[in-house]
Image (tube, rainbow, N blue to C red):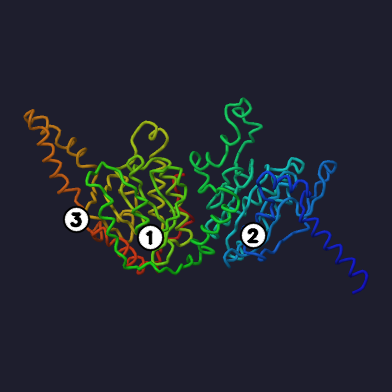
Amino acid sequence: MSKDSSDALEDLRYKRNLARVGGGIKRQESIRSSGRGTARDRIRALVDENSFVELDTFLTHRTTDYNMFMHETLGDGVVCGHGTINGRRVYCFAQDFSVHGGSMGEMHAKKISKVVEMAERSKVPLIGIWDGGGQRAQDGIAALGGTGELLDRLVQCSGRIPLLSLVLGPVVGVSALGAGLADFTILGSEHGQLFMSSPLETPECLNGEVDAAGLGGAELHASRSGVACLVAEDEDDACALAAEILSFLPDNNESNPPIEPTGDDPGRLNPDLSKLVPDNPNKPYDMVKVIEEVVDDNIFMQLFDSYAENILIGFGRLDGKTVGIVANQPKVLAGCLDIDASIKAARFIRTCDAFNIPLVTFEDVPGFLPGVVQEWGGIIRHGAKLLFAYAEATVPKLTLVTRKAYGGAYLAMSCKHLQSDYNIAWPTAELAVMGAEGAVNIIHRREIAAAEEGDKEETRLQLVGEYKSKFGDPYVAARNGWLDDVIDPEESRMRLIRALRILYSKREWSPPKKHGNIPL
């Protein structure tokens, strides 16, 4: 090898080593001592060993006005590339907090945009690890221009490839919008924070009324804002959760989710389900137990479990095939639908529909939650989102009614009238405009009032029984074709799997249009 070639090779090695230390060894060690990982630490934890191929290692910013403050750093504060997770190809990026606090300058944003575009062209999932203090002031409007291009790329990818965000540090401003555009956003419990406005600019934080965690911490976004689908215990857990979500998803919208071989017998009966629903229609029970009893190997990956707890969403498998599960939770608000529950379920339904994931609905809903707060908050508009999402979805739709299916909420929860493919019910199910007690009090109020004082309760109970047999019995709906069958609870898993097997190849045609106008 000539001396010139040897020098060039040595220079290359020096520059690569320089890029690996980001903002310097001291800053990286300071980050590690705080319990956080560096950008490369995080990528190593995310992808399979030795699978990561880095791109744009030598890219730098091109800011000239503030050179006295802006030292040139190879990579410009973000590590981008591709690798594999459990053998599946992914593109990924990780912001480097050791370089200018992970702030997003023009070239930083363009570098991420390039990886997003490559992921879309390759039709593989994209995972972003966010940890940065918003847009870089030194870059001025150029930083916003680069960020705008990135946001546009993310929007174009939405519904085409799975997008996952891992928020493992403070993410501020427009960068928070980028993280929030993902299909699934996971926050680290200790360090993951999302803010539109910095705590340094928020009056309540400046006055000491609330701290940074209270303004935009993981628990806040998991329980109040509904931004975080999951909260990770630490960074390794965040990477493991991302890998688990990815295992349920296809590479893109033109392929089907992977099939996971299982030893769980498709014909397995569920005798325990007969005991789960109480005889008293007003007594709560845990719908999670119903779901876990039905799905393969009792594995139900619940999402947004701290937000709008009156409805459950998540992934499971039937016969090895991924299904998206939506279920009312009788333990919380009696399973009523409210604003937050409608939004939560509607977005998940549209996500499943985008990625060819069949929907299975477990229904026990007494109606929409009444009250001034709900009406003033726009329950009509938000409830319509849920109905719209179900009606718009073209994937296989299966519904199991376990107990109550009343009124408008019955219609909004994947009923036969919204072209659901397979609707079944247990004998305990009641399908009606409203509960028998409420209906009788309205329809027969004069008759009850006219009864002798000692006979009023007996008259009312008799009328309730007559109403249930005439309108609430599941066989009434079955006779009209609004239920495909009334089944023994222990056959639930077997019946759903049989239906899914024939419906898995379902294709639905609709007249061409640009898109529907969901009531956002």
Q: Residue at x 31, y 42 (%)?
A: 367
> Is residue 340 depicted above or below 152 in this figure?
above
Specify the label residue 505 is tagged with. none
Does label 3 or label 2 sit earlier along the sequence? Answer: 2
Q: Which residue is mark 3?
A: 475
Looking at numbered disc 2 in the image, what kind of residue is underneath it? Glu
Mark 3 and mark 2 in contact? Answer it, CB < 8 Å: no
Q: Residue at x 6, y 29 (%)?
A: 452
Residue 8: x and y, percent? Answer: 88, 66
Residue 10: x and y, percent? Answer: 86, 64
Residue 87: x and y, percent? Answer: 58, 68
Looking at numbered disc 1 in the image, what kind of residue is underneath it? Val
Q: Which residue is mark 2?
A: 117
Q: Residue at x 58, y 46 (%)?
A: 188
Q: Nearer the viewer, mark 1 or mark 3?
A: 1
The residue sitting at the left extreme is: 452
Using a 10 Å C-alpha cutoff, classify the residue at mark 3 as few (fewer than 14 neighbours), some (14 to 19) or many (20 or more): many
Question: Label 2 vs label 1: CA separation?
Answer: 36 Å
Question: Depth check: 424 or 63 in front?
Answer: 424
Image-based side of 47 in relation to 508, left or right: right
The residue sitting at the right extreme is: 3
Image-based side of 192 in relation to 462, left or right: right
Q: Which residue is mark 1?
A: 295
Mark 1 and mark 3 in contact? Answer it, CB < 8 Å: no
The residue sitting at the top extreme is: 207
Mark 2, secondary structure of its residue? helix
Does label 1 or label 3 sit earlier along the sequence? Answer: 1
